[in-house]
Amino acid sequence: MEQYFQKEIECASYEDIRKMQSEKLVKQVQHVWDNVPYYRKKMEEKGVTPDDIKSVDDLYKLPFLSKKDLRDAYPTGLLGVPQKDCVRIHSTSGTTGKRVIAFYTQHDIDLWEDCCARAIVAAGGSSDDVCQIAYGFGLFTGGAGLNGGSHKVGCLTVPISSGNTERQMMFIQDLQATILCCTPSYAAYLSEKYKEEGYSPEDIPLKAGIFGAEAWSEEMRHEIETTLGIKAFDIYGLTELSGPGVAFECCEQNGMHINEDHFIAEIIDPDTEEVLPEGSQGELVFTAVDKEAFPMLRYRTRDICKLTRGKCSCGRTFIKMAKPMGRSDDMLIVRGVNVFPSQIETVLLNNGYAANYQIVVDRENNTDSLDVQVEMTPEMFTDNVGEIEERQKKLVEDMKSMLGIKVRISLLAPKSIARSEGKAVRVIDKRKI
Ligand code: DLL
């Protein structure tokens, strides 16, 4: 039977959720107007005052916040409370430009951990479980968020952090860990290690995984689930909105329920900023209605995805977001065609490869080139040139029908691509170097 961490909220009626969102939104807009001069100025420039916002239906009147605003207001320009009322910061893992620093009051942390606890319970977690947190701890939100959620659920929590794969496996086996939380690329690496060491799924005590922080395909889910003998659940979030737990998957495993009592989601056209109807693909925008320290109104995530509201067999009523295709800034434009790394991953995994690949984009003779370098699995590995050429040809054809353009395929020996303990680096765009 489906379990919930906060059933009355997770299964509330649509009308009750809307009402709750509207009430919180009105208060939050006033809070921001009173306490965040940076956003107040943006509202004034758009000719909006708190009086114009009476319910969720007025959300469209508010100005957007973007990554650029966060950089401009760095580090404290968007603080909604005096710094002495904050108890923690986290920061994005971004490598370009200034990092984003997100601030939290104790109340913010409490609500964030509730969101993570909802995700753990939706994945079947309870106080009977041993939950191994292999997301990084520190400035990254993954470790701290799920650690807090796991405590709230009452699991025996193993805050092992990322890396040291042998130790991860030792703790999983010795403590009989039942839930694993890490990035999907690290879960794939652990699966590979278990396979290499001759474990079969029955030898591995895990029953569920809560994997997120990067885009991953259904094919990758299937691969991890069969190797580890678990159910793999997706979890979504971003530092600006607290961290993991903005949305989480339930037993249906087909999209993530957005914690709508805390976050109002919209989909917009990234070019025109027009709000799109439900079911359209576009950029995800979130309004956090009760964050105190770092209030985000209409924050443009740059993640491309779809929203659908429908009846879910788990009983939750929160709207669902599809797996994000990737970030709009991860989308490659190659010879004028839009290419998402996740599409390439789908073709590779459908052809029996593991998710050990890299995409190299370059410009040669004024034309874009797209090179997909993928490792052969140990079973495929051969020095029979004819066989390798056949494999390459098949991938080139399948990529062409998925993407509509010709790509170059390089088949590499197993273990040639570095494994990742956190978010995997999939794309090297030499045009930008
Ligand atoms: O990645 C928070 C997180 C930690 C989420 C652990 C889930 C699990 P950031 O480092 O700020 O925060 O990166 C946020 O990662 O805008 C998406 O582009 C991407 N992302 C996060 N979760 C998913 C997911 C954390 N499930 C950025 N699928 C987001 C696809 C995801 N992309």
Image (cartoon, rainbow, N blue to C red):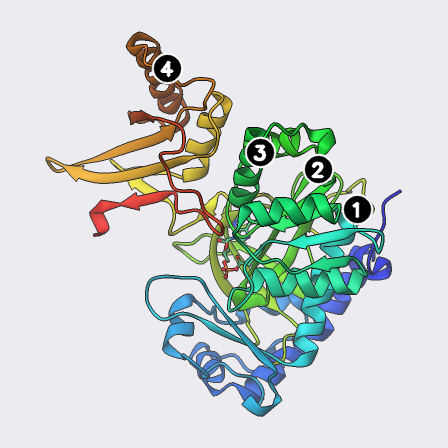
Mark 4 vs 3, N-terminal side: 3
Q: Position of residue 304 (x, y in %)?
A: 48, 48
Measured in 3D between alpha carbons, the distance from the residue under mark 3 to the one under mark 1, in whole angstroms, is 20 Å
Q: Closest to the observer: 364 or 351?
A: 351
| Measured Cα–Cα span from mark 1 to mark 4 | 42 Å
Of the two numbered discs 4 and 2 in the rendering, the one whose residue sits closer to the viewer? 4
Query: From what the image shows, is residue 167 above or below residue 343?
Result: below
Total marks drawn? Answer: 4
Please state the horizontal and vertical placement of residue 239, each as a whole percent of the image: 53, 65
Q: Residues within 10 Å of mark 4 (few under 14, many from 20)?
A: few
Q: Earlier in the sequence, mark 3 or mark 2?
A: 3
Q: Which residue is identified by label 2? A: 231
Label 3 Cα neighbours within 10 Å, binned few <14 / some 14-19 / many ≥20: some
Confirm if mark 2 falls within 8 A of ligand 1: no
**Residue tagged 4:** 382
**Image vertical order of residue 218 relative to residue 81, above or below:** above
Earlier along the polypeptide chain: callout 1 or callout 4?
1
Q: Where does residue 31 sit, x and y in percent of width and height?
A: 61, 84
Identify which residue is drawn at 62% across, 84% down.
30
Badge 1 amino acid:
Gly
Q: Which residue is mark 1?
A: 124
Is residue 278 visible to the viewer in this orientation of the structure? no
Marks 2 and 3: in contact by CB < 8 Å?
no
Q: Are marks 1 and 2 in contact (CB under 8 Å)?
A: yes
Q: Secondary structure at mark 1?
A: loop
Residue behind mark 3:
218
Q: CA distance from mark 1 to mark 2?
A: 10 Å
**Nearer the viewer's eye, disc 1 or disc 4?**
4
